[in-house]
Image (cartoon, helix red, strand yellow):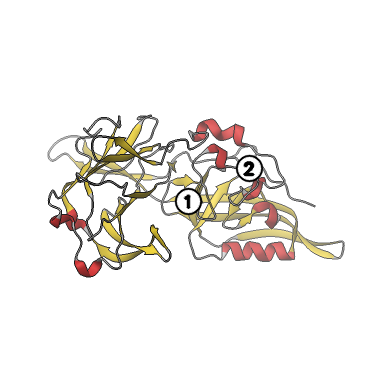
Amino acid sequence: MEVLKGDFIGFSIGNFHSSKLGILRTSDGSRFNESLLPGFSDATAQVPGGDGMYYWKSNYSQKPFSIPIAYDSMTETQLRNLRRAMACKNIIPLVFDERPYKEYLVKPTGEPQLSYICFDEKDQRVYKGEGALEFTAYSPFARNRHINGKGLKYLNEFRSDGEYSIPEWVGFASNRDEWSESSNMLMQQGDYDQPQKFNMDTPQYGIKVYNAGDLETNFKLFIALETGGVFPVKTLCLQRNPKEISPMFPGKILNFHDSVADRTIPVNDQKDNKFICVDVKSNLLLGYSAKDGQPDEPDEPTGKIYNSLIKEGDFFTIPPSFDYPEMYLAVHLDTGIKKDPIEKLEYDYLYY
C-alpha cells in the first residue's frame, strides 16, 4: 500500500519524506493543532515601592514540535529508515507539505515511541499502528526552503523538476497556488538581489532587496578588496530610493574610515584575503579567500577579522517588505572606483 502525501498528512525530516517512511501525520481527534508562535519570556522588574511592573522586551525561546503519526503497512526497511532519521544528532530541516516554502531547522528530541501490531503481507513483515515524533527548533523561526544548498526565494523557483526540485512534488501535484499569497514571495527575481550602479556621476552602487518574511533578517555582503588590500566602501545603509544619499533609518548605518590607509588590510594578509564579508549576524567584518581558479568567487573564511575598518555606526538588518515595499542596500564607494566591488549578497526570509 502506497502512503499518501499532501497537505496536513505529509512532511519531510532531513532527506526523508514521510511517504517514503510509510507514515502519515494525523490529527488529534477531529482537529489539527498548531502553535502560532514560539514560546517567549518577558523581561520585567517590579516597580520599587509601587504597583505594577516595568516591561522592557520579550524574547522568543525554542519551538517544540510533536507530530502524531499512523502507519498501516510500514515495512521493515521503512522502520529502519525511520530509526535512522530520528537518530540524527545534527540540525536538519523539517518541512510540512502544506507550506513547502519554509523549513524549520530542528533536532530530533525525546525518545520516539511506536505502538504497533505486526502482520505478514505477501511474505513481507509489515507494521500497523501509531506513534509520535518529537523535534525542537532551537532557533524558533522558519526560513525559506533550501534545496541542495540553494535558498528558494521566488515562486518560479519552486518546481517539480530540475536540480532544485521540491522532492515531495515529484510525481505529485504542486500546491503552490494554495500558499503563494501567504508566502509573500515574488513570482520571479527580476532586478532584485542584483548589484547595480545607482548614480552614474558618483561611485554609488547597491542592490534592490526584498524580504518576504515576517521578521527582520540578517545578511552577508561580500565585497572584493581593491589592489593593495583596500576596502573600497565608505558607507553602507538602506535607502528608499537609489538616487537618494540619505539612509532610510538614520541610526542604522555603517561608516568606514575616510583615509584609504585606515581601510587597508595588513600586507601579510593580502595574499589570502581577497574579500571582506559584512556578516550582520556575528557583527563582524570577515576575511574570505577566493576559490581556486575563480578569483571573483569568495570561498572560505580565513579567520581574519577586520572590524577596525569601521569608523562609526551599527550593523543593521533588512526589515520585512510588508512595511517597506521598496528598499535598496546602498554601497557608497571611494571616489575613483570604476569597478563594482559587490560580489554577492546572501539573506534568508524568516517566518513564524
Residue 28 position (above or below residue 112): above
Q: Residues within 10 Å of mark 1 (few under 14, many from 20)?
A: some
Task: Look at the image and tell me whether residue 322 can be seen.
Answer: yes
Q: Identity of the amino acid at label 2?
A: Ser
Q: Quadrant of residue 56?
A: top left
Residue position for label 2: 27
Question: How many neighbours does mark 2 have within 10 angstroms: few (below 14), some (14-19), or many (20 or more)?
Answer: some
Q: Earlier in the sequence, mark 1 or mark 2?
A: 2
Depth check, front residue: 286 or 38: 286
Circle 2 SS class: loop
Q: Residue at x 61, y 48 (%)?
A: 165
Kind of residue at badge 1: Pro
> Under tag 1, what secondary structure?
strand
Residue 25 shows up from this direction: no
Query: How many discs appear?
Result: 2
Residue at image x 63%, y 49%?
162
Asked if disc 1 and disc 2 are in contact, CB closer than 8 Å, the reply is no
Reading the image, the residue beneath label 1 is: 64
The residue lying furthest to the right in this view is 122
Residue 310 in the figure: left or right of residue 2:
left
340 relative to 113, above or below: above
Q: Is residue 254 left or right of residue 89?
A: left
Q: Position of residue 309 (x, y in %)?
A: 18, 55
Residue 176 spot, x, y in % from top left? 60, 36
Rendering quarter of residue 249: top left
Please give left or right for residue 95 compared with residue 333 in the image.
Answer: right
What is the distance, in whole Å, between disc 1 and disc 2 at their CAs? Answer: 17 Å
Find residue 211 and report its horizontal and vertical position in percent. 40, 38
Side of 218 relative to 26 (left or right)? left
In the picture, the disc for residue 275 is: none
Q: Position of residue 158 (x, y in %)?
A: 58, 42
